[in-house]
Image (cartoon, helix red, strand yellow):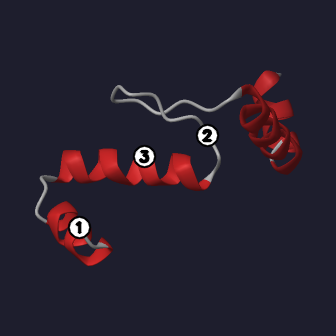
Amino acid sequence: MSAAEIIEQIKALPPRDQHKVASFVRALTNGARVPAGDAATMDSETFAKAKTAVFQKHDEVLRRLAQ
């Protein structure tokens, strides 16, 4: 099956299933582990990098929220 055929099949899915496919692809692109079930989870290294980036970018907002 070609990528074009797969894309057409994804387009034919209901929105909820399209969202699951998109989440799966994002997880693969970001290097996260993708379990066999519905939800994708990040490995601890990917999570740590994301956490650090969020806290650095939004430090002031998070500090105000904590007060």
Q: Is residue 52 left or right of residue 1?
A: right
Numbered circle sitting on residue 32: 2
Is label 1 in contact with label 3 (beta carbons under 8 Å)? no
Q: Secondary structure at mark 2?
A: loop
Q: Nearer the viewer, mark 1 or mark 3?
A: 1
Q: Secondary structure at mark 1?
A: loop
Residue type for callout 2: Ala
Q: Position of residue 64 (x, y in %)?
A: 82, 33
Identify the residue at image location x=51%, y=53%. Answer: 26
Residue type for callout 1: Met
- Residue position for label 1: 1
Q: Is residue 16 left or right of residue 46?
A: left
- Residue position for label 3: 24
Closer to the chain start, of discs 2 and 1, is: 1
Closer to the chain start, of discs 3 and 2, is: 3
Identify the residue at image location x=80%, y=23%. Answer: 66
Q: Secondary structure at mark 3?
A: helix
Name the quarter where the C terminus is drawn.
top right
Q: Residue furthest bottom?
A: 4
